[in-house]
Image (cartoon, helix red, strand yellow):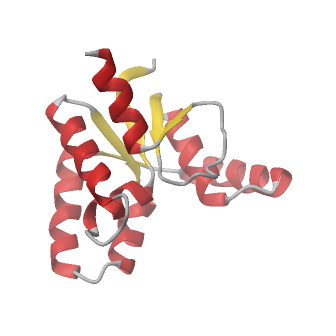
Amino acid sequence: MRSDKKIFLDINVVIDFLDRSRPQHNSSVKLIEYLTLNNYEICISEDMLTTIYYISKEKESVLKFLNFIAEQWNILHFGKETIQWAVAMSLENKQDLEDQLQCLCAQAAACCCLITHDKTFYDCGMTIYTAKEFLTEKIEQT
């Protein structure tokens, strides 16, 4: 059953949160603060952990943050079937494999939406927001 309090973060939102020099840093910080304070279940895929670590310059800080993620967030697994399905869909639709995997992962976990800063993220039939769009909608609802 889908939960309105279960969201999936694309890797760019997490990287934006960690890197102060990125244009979407402030909106990502506000988003993660909002989600945490309002008891949202934050989901990411397991492949993000190694990617975030690999591209980071501040290895020790990132390791501490990854430890926080492991304790507080829901880390989702792809599994062989999801990977095969995403590869097939990527080949068939000429879509980005990472987007396909993230979307299938979010759908399988019954997330209510996916939050990304990728303007060309694959439309996979679920609600997709930027951090700013998500926050604007939630603030307007209160």
Q: Residue furthest right?
A: 92
Residue 46 seen: no
Q: Is residue 22 above or below residue 60?
A: above
Which quarter of the rendering shows the C terminus? top left
Residue found 54% across the figure and 51% down from its top: 79
80 with respect to 134 (left or right): right
Q: Position of residue 66 (x, y in %)?
A: 23, 63
Residue nearer the viewer, 87 or 93: 93
Q: Position of residue 89 (x, y in %)?
A: 77, 49
129 with respect to 24 (left or right): right
Residue nearer the viewer, 118 or 136: 136
Residue 25 seen: yes
Q: Position of residue 51 (x, y in %)?
A: 42, 71
Q: Is residue 105 above or below residue 113?
A: below
Residue nearer the viewer, 29 or 75: 29
Q: Position of residue 71 (x, y in %)?
A: 17, 50
101 with respect to 71 (left or right): right
